[in-house]
Image: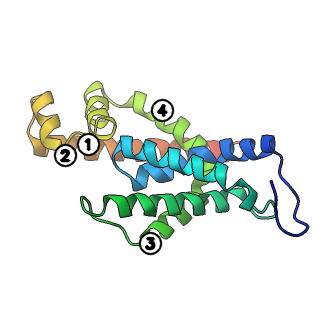
Amino acid sequence: MANEGNLQLVSAERFAELWNEAAGAVSAYVAAEVRNRHDAEDVMQEIGRAVAQGAERYDPQRPFINWVFGVARNQILRHYQRQSRERTVFSSAIVDQLADAYRAMAPTLGERGDALRDCLQKLSRRQRLAVALYYRDELSQTEIAEQMTMTASAVGVLIHRSRQALKDCIGRKLAAGAERP
C-alpha cells in the first residue's frame, strides 16, 4: 500500500483485521439505511470492494472506523442515486448523521447483538413470528395479519409491544453488563 509522505504502511493482514472489526458496525449502518435486505447486501459488497480498492488511501494515523464509514456513506449515496427514480432519496446530511451515530455505537454493537439474540428468545412465539415476518421477511402489517389471522392494527400493536419489550430487555442486559467489573 502506497501512502504519500512518511505515513506508516499497513500490512494487508492488518488491513483485513481492521475491516473484519469494522464490518459489523458498517453492516448495521447499511441495514438501517437500506431497508431491502438484498439491496443492503449489494451495498455491503460495493463497500467491501471500494475499501479493498482504496486501501492505499487509508491513513493509518487516523481511526479506521472513520475512514470506512466515509467509504460506506459514499456507497450508500451512490445506491440512492441509482434508486432515485424508484424511491425517496435521503439527503447527504441525514446519511452523515446516521453514519456518526453508528460510528459512535460501533464499540457496543457486538454486545447489543448478543443481547438482542437473548431477548428475542424471551418473546412469546407469536411475538417472535411477527417480528421475524416484519424485519426479516420485510412483510407489511397487512401481509402479516393475513398469515397470522389477525387484523393489521392488531399486528401493529403486537410489533410495537414486541419492540418495546426488546428495548427494555436489551437495556437491562447492557446495564447489567456495564456494572460488571
Tags 3 and 4 touching, CB below 8 Å? no
Q: Is residue 61 above or below residue 167?
A: below
Q: Is residue 13 left or right of residue 22?
A: right
3D distance between C-alphas at marks 1 and 2: 5 Å
Bin the neighbour count of mark 2 within 10 Å (Cα to Cα): few under 14, some 14-19, many 20 and up: some
Q: What residue did someone put label 4 on? A: 117
In the picture, the disc for residue 101 is none
Q: Nearer the viewer, mark 3 or mark 2?
A: 3
Task: Identify which amino acid the numbered label 4 is placed on.
Answer: Arg
Residue 44 on image: x %, y %: 50, 46
Is label 4 in a helix, a strand or a loop? helix
Bin the neighbour count of mark 3 within 10 Å (Cα to Cα): few under 14, some 14-19, many 20 and up: few
3D distance between C-alphas at marks 4 and 1: 17 Å
Task: Identify which amino acid the numbered label 1 is placed on.
Answer: Ile
Q: What residue did someone put label 2 on? A: 156
Residue 81 on image: x %, y %: 37, 64
Most distant residue in the top direction: 125
Q: What residue did someone put label 3 on? A: 92
3D distance between C-alphas at marks 3 and 2: 31 Å
Residue 177 on image: x %, y %: 63, 42
Is label 3 in a helix, a strand or a loop? helix
Q: What residue did someone put label 1 on? A: 159
3D distance between C-alphas at marks 2 and 4: 22 Å
